[in-house]
Amino acid sequence: MAKLKSSYFCQNCGAQSPKWIGKCPSCNQWNTYVEEIVQKEDKAAKSWRPAREGAAGFIRLNQPQPITAIQPRAEERFHTEDGELNRVLGGGIVPGSLVLIGGEPGIGKSTLMLQIATAMKQLKVLYVSGEESEQQIKMRADRMQRNSPSCYILSETNLENIFVQIEEMQPELVIIDSIQTLHTARVESAAGSVSQVRESTGELMRFAKESHVPVFLIGHITKEGSLAGPKVLEHMVDTVLQFEGDRHMSYRILRTIKNRFGSTSELGIYEMTGDGLREVSNPSEILISQREEDLAGVTIGAMLEGNRPLMIEIQSLVSPATYGTPQRSSTGYDAKRLQMLLAVLEKRGGFRLGIHDVFLNIAGGLKVEDPAIDLAVCASLISSLKDVSISGRIAFAAEVGLGGEVRAVNRIENRISEAEKLGFDEIFISKFNKKGLDLKGVKMKVHAVSKLEEVFRLLL
């Protein structure tokens, strides 16, 4: 019999304490410590048996070896039928990887994973659901008109029973929906607690690394938007993906937060339809609103999200302040950077923006951190201030410095190519970006400027 003892865990960050305390010293949250029964490891209750057991049941220990003697093994990725998921994973699913997907309830995490499970017909896939029955999953698959004889459904929450089915079935891909519903007999606490989530994830990680079978975990998020469970959960897995979007709108964004096998700046965009999630191969078209005439305060900026160039619409409204202190509000754009650009426009450009309310919005629900849209933001603000519209066929791709100078940005060729592909006639870039830039074959007009005054003189 394993020795039982109790300990207190913070349900917000996973910190442990031998006694109850009111305020967590790690995350500074109040009343988050809950008592949980923990026990020392019982070898008779192991969830996943190690693959290197000797004849007498002893485990062979790994031997250290010099790094020069290690032979690299070329791992072939599994390419899914979903191009957006391949992009955010860095080119496909790596064998033996542990991927965590988080998102709000109803955002489409289970729908996305069920689509992947039924689309990969060349692999034997086990979809384990702790929240839905087999009949409910079958109804969803029929609604999306997606079925596959190589996709197996298991409704189970006990981790030991899941590993029994895995040993019998020998799947090539495992999907767990969700990690917060699993529980193991090795921990005497409720499902979803810090101890259960940490122990279940550790066993699944051990299984993935020793069997080279990729495992996808679906995770819930807290009301603050972070993944539920201990913070160590994100450190244990290889990849963390965040599924974002407004449930009342049709578009969803799959963003990479952590990736040991690729870039952490990639972005995938989907559209939620009645038949499931549809890949959006050209997101620039949905981020630019269709309007019949040019409006004051609306400009188009060329940004980069990972390796993907996007054309986004910046909307601003500048109006005289009515209630004394002017308001400064931004959606999808850093409020401090907006304050900086307003100060530059007032000091270097001579525009009296200190007595005006300023509202800025990035269309499409994106949160933009690329400084290359600074020039588009400045042009949008002055367009709204002067009530003069800027042609919707003009794009901007440059950073603005504190001296009012137009600074160069990286990968300008990709931004120009994307603007030309979408039918733009002109683009404003920094003069310093023109050095070494090959404009042969570029039909659109490229304006290379060095100061904000040159931009406003050409536009207004």
Image (cartoon, rainbow, N blue to C red):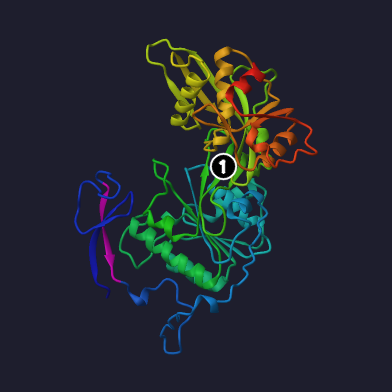
Q: Nearer the viewer, residue 190 or 308?
A: 308
Residue drawn at x 46%, y 23% as measured from the top left: 343
Q: Nearer the viewer, residue 258 or 105?
A: 258
Q: Judge left or right: residue 421 versus residue 363.
A: right
Image height check: is 186 above or below 230? below
For residue 251, what is the image quadrant?
A: top right
Residue at the extreme bottom of the image, as rendered: 56
Residue 35 shown in magenta = yes
Task: Point out the image quarter for the N terminus.
Answer: bottom left
Q: Is residue 158 visible?
A: no
Give the x, y percent position of residue 137: 56, 52
Image height check: is 84 above or below 98? above
Image height check: is 98 above or below 366? below
Residue drawn at x 70%, y 19% as measured from the top left: 292
Please state which amino acid type lies under the numbered disc 1.
Ile
Q: Judge left or right: residue 350 versus residue 47.
A: right
Q: Which residue is mark 1?
A: 253
Task: Point out the image quarter for the C terminus.
Answer: top right
What residue range appears in magenta? 32-40
Give the x, y percent position of residue 18: 21, 59
